[in-house]
Structure formats: structure tokens, C-alpha cells
Image (cartoon, rainbow, N blue to C red):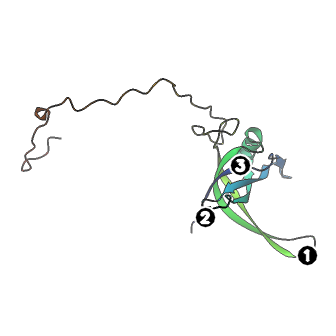
Amino acid sequence: MLNVVALMGRLVADPELRQTPQGVSVTTFTIAVDRSFVRQGEQRQADFIDIVCWRSSAEFVCKYFSKGSLIAVNGSIQTRSYQDRNGNNRKAFEIVADNVHFAGGKNGSGPVGGGNNSGYAPRQEFSSAAPQAAPSYSAGSNDDFAVIDDGEDLPF
């Protein structure tokens, strides 16, 4: 069986860290994930997906993410049943996160070179110098190449 989920979206509210009676850290939050298909003339739709993080991942999310932050999550889908206040049976679907990663800069505006649930990975700065021109191969001659006889073993 296979139950693997990978999502990237923006937090719709600030995550809040809670503790179970046994002292285990947990947080639940919702991310807005854009749909990949857009009908012509319509705006892109988004799905709002509930995420659950436990232990150090929960602490990591609450420390480094806030409303509007771009986040990447991978984990698995879990379902649970419950009764609402009116006695109706309900089913909840949520993603239990295995790993959480940064997906945008500190201000949420751009990509970051990685990140993981062990702490903040600082953005790698790239040189703004002009790129070097590609080498020109037109200056070579046909004498630079050797013919390999197919009947012999390869020289390596």
C-alpha cells in the first residue's frame, strides 16, 4: 500500500503550539494550495488542507512559520471519525506531516535553497556579476579527433 502526500502552499493563519496531556508537542494548521488547472477566463482555485505536525516538527513550524508563509509538507493522509454537536457522524481528512520545509524566503516572496525541520537554512546569495561567455568550439580542427577501430577493445 502507498500513502504519500507532497504539498506546497501558504499558511492561512499563524500556527499555535499545544501540548498533549503526556507533554508531546502538536500543532494543526491549514494551508492554501493552488490547483494546477485553471479554466480560461476564471481565477485559479485553491484547496484548504489541514496539516498536523508532532514533536520537533510542530515546534519548528510554530517557531519559523506564520500566516502567509510558503511551506512544503510531505507526509500521509489520515482520516478520523467524530460526532458533531448535533450528533451527526462526520469524517475528517488531514495530512500528518513527516517533514516540513521552507519553500520561500523570510518574507515569503522567493525560493530558498532548501530547509528542513532541524532549523532555518539561510538563503544562499548568488553573485550578481555578468555570466561568463560560453567557450567557443569553432576554433578546433578535425585533427583533434581520433578514429576508434570498432574491432578492438575500448581503451578504458
Q: Is residue 112 left or right of residue 82?
A: left
Q: Disc 2 on helix, strand or loop?
A: loop
x 68%, y 54%: residue: 97
Task: Report, in whole angstroms, how far the alpha carbon at label 3 lies from the one at label 1.
Answer: 33 Å
Q: Earlier in the sequence, mark 3 or mark 2?
A: 2
Q: Position of residue 110 (x, y in %)?
A: 63, 39
x 72%, y 54%: residue: 32
> Badge 2 is on which residue?
3
Amino acid at dot 3: Arg
Q: Earlier in the sequence, mark 3 or mark 1?
A: 3
> In front of the other: label 3 or label 1?
3
| Disc 1 residue crowd, few under 14, some 14–19, many 20+, Cα 10 Å | few
Task: Report, in whole angstroms, how far the alpha carbon at label 2 lies from the one at label 1.
Answer: 30 Å
Q: Disc 1 on helix, strand or loop?
A: loop
Q: Disc 3 on helix, strand or loop?
A: strand
x 57%, y 30%: residue: 124
> In front of the other: label 3 or label 2?
3
Q: Position of residue 78 (x, y in %)?
A: 70, 64
Please say if 145 is above or below 81: above
Q: What number is the disc on residue 87?
A: 1
Amino acid at dot 2: Asn
Task: Report, in whole angstroms, how far the alpha carbon at label 3 lies from the one at label 2.
Answer: 23 Å
Please say if 4 is above or below 88: above
Amino acid at dot 1: Gly
Q: Are marks 3 and 1 in contact (CB under 8 Å)?
A: no
Residue 138 location, quadrant:
top left
> Badge 3 is on which residue?
10
